Amino acid sequence: MVNSKSSKQVLNRQYRYKYDILFLHVPALSPEMRGFRSSFNVVAMGLFSMCTELAKAGFNPQIINLGLQKLLNWNFDIAQYIKDNKIKIVGISLHWHYHAYDAITVAKHIKEVNPDIFLFFGGYTSSAFAKDLLKSYSFIDAVIKGEGEKPVIKIVDQIKNKDNNFSKIENLCWRYKNKIRCNNKIWFA
């Protein structure tokens, strides 16, 4: 087990950069014991390809595996990290239904602490239940259905340019003026 002082030093070194977008993998967390357990710790490969495409487009993305951060420091608060680093766009991977509860709970906490961020979901389960997620959870701003490499670049670009009309972004269901809209344009690699 890593001691908290050294893990804090690692986190401080790792997080000294300004990021345009944060991708977050939330495993199924089990905090009922003082120890730490989590399931579905493997980050979906799509996050890495989206980061690659964003970097090629000139943006600075970051991936955080919340399971790993909690292993290093159980008291790590992702919502406070987002606030401290002034991150404006957060994408949460909801790939497998097994970690849906934890991903949604973490998303709610993030949005409560950071009400002005743009928070979206993506992944297999998110794709299948995009409209349901948006109807049930007002703190989720959008869901990328299917592949996200091209849509996420457009989302980040439009948000940085203060353009909140996402009607031309492929694979996107989103909330606009309290209505849920799903774009008919589809993109796949």
Image (cartoon, rainbow, N blue to C red):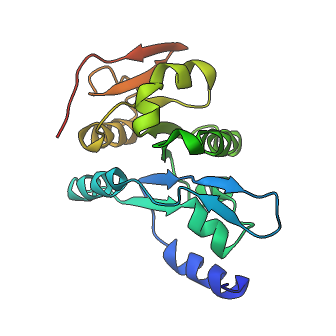
Q: Nearer the viewer, residue 22 or 122?
A: 122
- The residue sitting at 41% across, 15% down in the picture is 181
Report whether 33 appears left or right of 9: right
Q: Position of residue 48 (x, y in %)?
A: 33, 58
In the picture shown, does residue 138 fall above or below 160?
Answer: above
Q: Nearer the viewer, residue 30 or 64?
A: 30
Number of numbered labels in the structure image: 0
Q: Quadrant of the N terminus?
A: bottom right
In the picture shown, does residue 147 fall above or below 185?
Answer: below
Q: Looking at the image, which residue sits at the far left?
A: 189
Q: Quadrant of the C terminus?
A: top left
- The residue sitting at 65% across, 87% down in the picture is 6
User: In which quarter of the view is residue 32 placed?
Assistant: bottom right
User: In which quarter of the view is residue 55 placed?
Assistant: bottom left
- The residue sitting at 22% across, 25% down in the picture is 186
Report whether 119 appears left or right of 74: left
In the picture shown, does residue 112 fall above or below 30?
Answer: above
Report whether 132 appears left or right of 54: right
- The residue sitting at 22% across, 53% down in the picture is 57
Report whether 28 appears left or right of 24: right
Q: Position of residue 87 (x, y in %)?
A: 52, 52
Q: Position of residue 145 (x, y in %)?
A: 36, 30
In the picture shown, does residue 162 fall above or below 78?
Answer: above
Q: Position of residue 64 (x, y in %)?
A: 50, 61
Q: Looking at the image, which residue sits at the far top?
A: 179
